[in-house]
């Protein structure tokens, strides 16, 4: 699993193009402030592990990043461009859904960008040392 995490002052998206036939229909976008934005690519090799173990590894990394940025808002964004390897859409979505539940149970406010869509993104991110963190989990 590859993860690029950014602390963002502002983040917004609007759906541009559906790229997964099974994705639900989404027409509206959303906007967020003071958040951790996680670009996540679940890789094919992740499917060799129990989904819960991969979800826990992701959540622990996101909680650490949120603490370092004194932030309680986390946005999960599926971003299949951090590696050449991709897990199945079903496995990836399950990790996202389980991660969101665990984060909420830990007191975080969460959101997911629409799964199965290319999105128009607007990002305003400050330039300090822990505002951008890349990890291979």
Image (tube, helix red, strand yellow):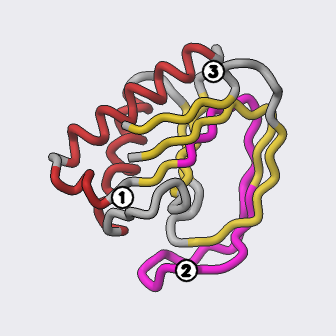
Between residue 59 and residue 1, name the one nearer to us.
1
Is residue 84 left or right of 130 when viewed as pictured?
left
Q: Marks 1/2: CA distance?
A: 15 Å
Q: What is the crowding at mark 1: few (fewer than 14 residues within 10 Å), some, or many (at least 20)?
A: many
Residue sitting at x 82%, y 28%: 126
Place of residue 124 in the rendered image (x, y in percent of width and height, measured from the top left): 84, 39
Q: Mark 1 points at which residue?
A: 92
- Residue range (magenta): 13-39
x 33%, y 50%: residue: 95
In primary-sequence order, the first of circles 3 and 1 is 3
Tell me the element at label 1. Answer: helix
Q: In this view, does 59 lie to the left or right of 134?
A: left
Q: In which image quadrant can residue 134 be found?
A: top right
Q: Residue 71 carries which label?
A: 3
Above-or-below relation of 66 to 51: above
Residue ID at (81%, 52%): 122
1 or 2: tag closer to the N-terminus: 2
**Picture layout, residue 135 above or below residue 18:** above
Q: Residue 1: percent from the left, percent from the top? A: 38, 47
Upstream in sequence: badge 3 or badge 2: 2
Q: In the rendering, which numbered label is found on residue 19?
A: 2
Nearer the observer: mark 3 or 2; the answer is 2
134 magenta-colored: no
Query: Eyeballing the image, is 32 above or below 46?
Result: above
Locate the C terminus by quadrant.
top left
């Amino acid at each position: 699993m590859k993860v690029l995490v950014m602390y963002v002052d502002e983040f917004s998206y609007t759906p541009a193009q559906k790229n997964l036939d099974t994705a639900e229909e989404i027409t509206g976008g959303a906007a967020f402030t003071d958040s951790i934005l996680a670009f996540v690519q679940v890789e094919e090799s992740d499917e060799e592990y129990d989904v819960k173990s991969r979800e826990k590894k992701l959540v622990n990394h996101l909680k650490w990043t949120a603490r370092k940025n004194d932030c309680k808002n986390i946005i999960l964004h599926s971003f299949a461009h951090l590696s050449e390897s991709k897990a199945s859409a079903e496995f990836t979505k399950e990790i996202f859904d389980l991660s969101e539940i665990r984060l909420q149970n830990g007191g975080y406010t969460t959101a997911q960008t629409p799964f199965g869509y290319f999105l128009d993104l607007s990002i305003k991110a400050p330039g300090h040392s822990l505002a951008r963190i890349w990890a291979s989990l």
